[in-house]
Image: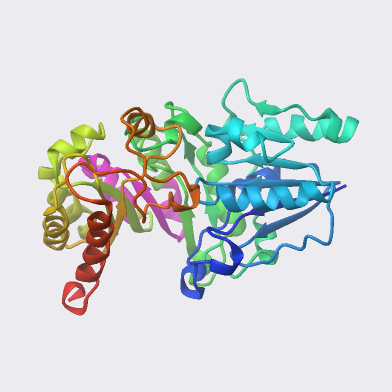
Amino acid sequence: MKIALISPAFMTVKTRRVGKLANFFKVPPMGLLNVATVTPSNIELTVIDEDFQDIDFSTAPDLVGISAMTATAPRAYEIASKFRRIGVPVVLGGPHPSLMYEEAREYADTVIIGEAEGAWERLLSDFMKNGKSGLKPYYQNQSRPDLAAIPFPRLELLKSMGNYAFTNLLHTSRGCPYNCSFCSVKQLLGNIPRHRPISDIVEQIKAIRKDTLIGKVFIFLDDNIMINNRYAKQLFREIAELDIMWISQTSINSTGDDELVELAGKSGCLALFIGLESISENSLEEMRKSQNKIAYYEQAIRKLHRQGIFVEGAFIFGFDSDRKDVFEKTVRFAKKLRLDGVQYSILTPLPGTDLYNTIKSENRFIEQDWSKYDCAQVVFRPRHMSPEELEAGLSWAYKKTYSFWGIF
């Protein structure tokens, strides 16, 4: 049996926005690699990242699986429809189909809701027994997968998928206990963090590490690698012996533990992505991000810099508390923090989030084209500025921050 697993391009093939440089730093579709890992070895697998590869619709696999985020959902539906027209059954999964499963079902023969491990194996069993007619409309796990029982992703498949800069990738955890209004991690992965055994992580690192500069760099794709202080400290102590460098993301409040920050530095932490989100206490309250304390931001960044850790801070524009001066104030504050990198984005009410439900109940959506839900375009009416002013402010903030003098 032949199965094709596909990660759709962010936009239609003719209008891809991802250039060669962005592709170089693109993270591979880990969800599909995880699915590939739990697929029986006697099945012939092809994994396609459409940002690198074209899809050959002239060759028909026995089954197609497509993983979609909200911004890639229209392209995913287009791909699914093309395959179904030539008689190939299609499975849709990933964040958007999981949260908009009834919509996704219109374009697929079946939908996996939530994490795939466990549900995917049951789906394959049904398909191998009775073909397309054996597929249920939806597959969903009754309980969260045990990370101790899940194999690490099949990274060897990356060789045929594209020219990724970094290929040493793994998760140490899934799930988040926080309840940010704009985030769907809790709905998708649960609010109780689950962790892989540290011994398994150490063995995986040893197995895939190479004695080259890039071969020593690892990316931990956790939503918050420091969410459990005790676990993170032990992890950092053990990987400190492995001569690696690593990149991940965490929350700003995790840096309140000085020992944890020091251990991160000693273990080889190169960089951390941190959601600072806003310089407004009202906006933080609005998004229910009480773990962020603006008065502590500068101290936290200094702690990380003392350990030689590069910090990329993320800010979001468009909260109801934001006025037109938010862009200038945020850029000035980012420079004051001496952040090494800055990511700005537009508040985007993604399906399944409390923010989405609020905006919908207030009838403030102005756009239902999912491809525009990419955190760079405005899809709802802001409170204190026009959609055009919000998009222009985002562009201005980037230009001001990454101008010659901004970088200097």
Residue at the (87%, 35%) spot, across then down:
131
Q: Nearer the viewer, residue 33 or 69?
A: 69
Placement of 61 over or under 104, stated as above or below? below
* Quarter occupied by the C terminus: bottom left
Q: Nearer the viewer, residue 53 or 166?
A: 53
Direction top: furthest residue = 142
Residue pictured at 62% horizontal, 46% vertical: 67
**Side of 204 relative to 315 (left or right):** right
Q: Is residue 349 positioned above or below 216 on the image?
A: above
Depth check: 18 or 77 in front?
Answer: 77
- Secondary structure that dominates the magenta span: helix
Identified at 68% across, 41% down, the residue is 107
Stretch of the chain drawn in magenta: 237-265
Asked if residue 75 is among those painted magenta in the image, a careful observer would answer no
Residue at the image point whose x is 62% and y is 50% from the top: 76
Residue 167: horizontal and vertical position, in percent?
56, 61
